[in-house]
Amino acid sequence: MRKALIGSKLRQLRRDHGQTQAEMARQLNISPAYVNLLENNQRSLSVKVLMALAEAYGIEIRELLSDRNAGRLADLRAAVADPAFGRDRPDLQELRGAVDHAPRLVDLFLQLYRSHRTAVDRISRIGGSGIEPALLVTSPETAVHDFFRDNRNYFDALETAAENVRGQFAGDADDIYAQLKRYLRQKLGIGVRLAPADDMPDALRVFDRQAGEVRLSQALDHANRSFQLAHVLALADIPYLLDSMIGEGGIDGDLAAARCRVELANYFAAALLMPYAPFLALAEATGYDVDRLGAAFGTSFEQVSHRLTALQRDGARGVGFFLIRVDKAGNVTKRVNATPFALAEKGGSCPVWNVHNAFATPGVILPQLVEMPDGSQFFTLSRTVKRPVFSPHLQDNRLAVALGCERGEAHRIGYAQAVNLGAEGPVAKIGVSCQLCPRQACSQRAHQPLHMDLPMDADRRGKTRYES
């Protein structure tokens, strides 16, 4: 068994029961000095004491051993990297000390920082219209994003459930659509019917539970038809697992729960179409070639990109990717993130980033090295993806997807051969957004930063009207 250091949890458990170290020691039949060593993480927890804790305080062993400190530390590092805190930031040792000895204070700080992040984001979007009551309300999308982020965008229970279903299929990826239809009909009593796009002008897929039928729009291509059927399979075959995960994740409110159920079913669908072990093996063998992965598994560029962000299984991890999707107006329409990086959490609005240039070269992958104001560097690749076409008026219905990882992992990615990974290679200086970016003399600046004043000299014209 790995060393179990639970000092902060033990201290909080004792305080919750109003006990001194001596009183807890008597209850566990150990010495007060040993309790003190455990609380200060100077001794690891023995199996005997672990069993005594579970029995004396009526808590589950799994709850005691669950380690949230790694996630706390990653979130804390990302938070203090915000330019709003200036340059005099705590080092890694200080942050670890806070996580180890004051976890509840850290949680409150992170909660306050998320509220600040939400407020700044909404202020920037409402443009000073004065809609104050809604500023600090956590949206369902934010709640679900944080739930996936807290789990590193990896859910072993869904992976296992998907593997169990996929094990009942015969044939290869080319037969998956027929296999899904057969499974839905024979195991779940659900039929599948393709409908003309004119008959489904406002939907791509409708699951009629009462009639036991799934209607798919003909506007969907083959890859997306398979994905939608796999999504319905999750809703119909493992509803109790989805509900359990939503409950354990603390997702409150009907709207947030519904949104979370959709995202968990999407995760299951991706795991079913692109099973973890063979997908990771091919990703490593091909240098994370998105097109070759899509061809092998019969999936789209965007589906493969999403799946790449979920390769976080202990002992079998892939590159730590994040994903951002934007529309032609620059709005971020989706974030998928298993990393602590500020670019993944808040970025997407900087015009210097190639994700926006992708619209000028549809279907072409654009690799780029980028640097945030805090000095952190990432390798990203951006490409447009098509949306289903319902009518002649939607011929150019595109979004752009950007995959990114820390620069230190870029050597594992074939696309990175197009950029210079050496220390002297060119790096694009980007930011989260103009409102939060402290960079001076940026030729793309569109707004004055909210948290600082850029220098202004009436006798000099700089690259933009916000800097001289």
Image: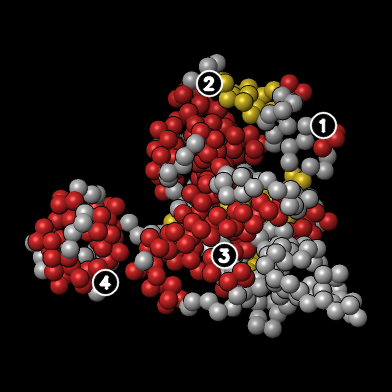
- Using the numbered discs, state the Cα–Cα distance from disc 3 to disc 1 in whole angstroms: 39 Å
Tell me the residue at 91%/81% (across/down): 459
Tell me the residue at 13%/61% (across/down): 23
- Using the numbered discs, state the Cα–Cα distance from disc 1 to disc 2 in whole angstroms: 28 Å
Mark 3, residue position: 341
- Using the numbered discs, state the Cα–Cα distance from disc 2 to disc 4 in whole angstroms: 55 Å
Q: Quadrant of the N terminus?
A: bottom left
Taking the image as shown, residue 284 lies to the left or right of residue 387, namely left
Mark earlier in primary sequence (3, 4):
4
- Disc 1 is placed on an element classified as loop
Which residue is more in the foreground, 226 or 60? 60
- Please, what is the three-letter code of the amino acid marked with disc 1? Ser
Mark 1, residue position: 391
Q: Residue furthest top?
A: 211
Mark 2, residue position: 209
Mark 4, residue position: 40
Mark earlier in primary sequence (2, 4):
4
Which residue is more in the foreground, 270 or 29? 29
- Please, what is the three-letter code of the amino acid marked with disc 2? Arg
- Using the numbered discs, state the Cα–Cα distance from disc 4 to disc 1 in whole angstroms: 65 Å
Figure quadrant of residue 242: top left
Residue 447 percent coordinates (x, y) = 78, 63
Residue 359 percent coordinates (x, y) = 80, 54
Taking the image as shown, residue 275 lies to the left or right of residue 217, namely left
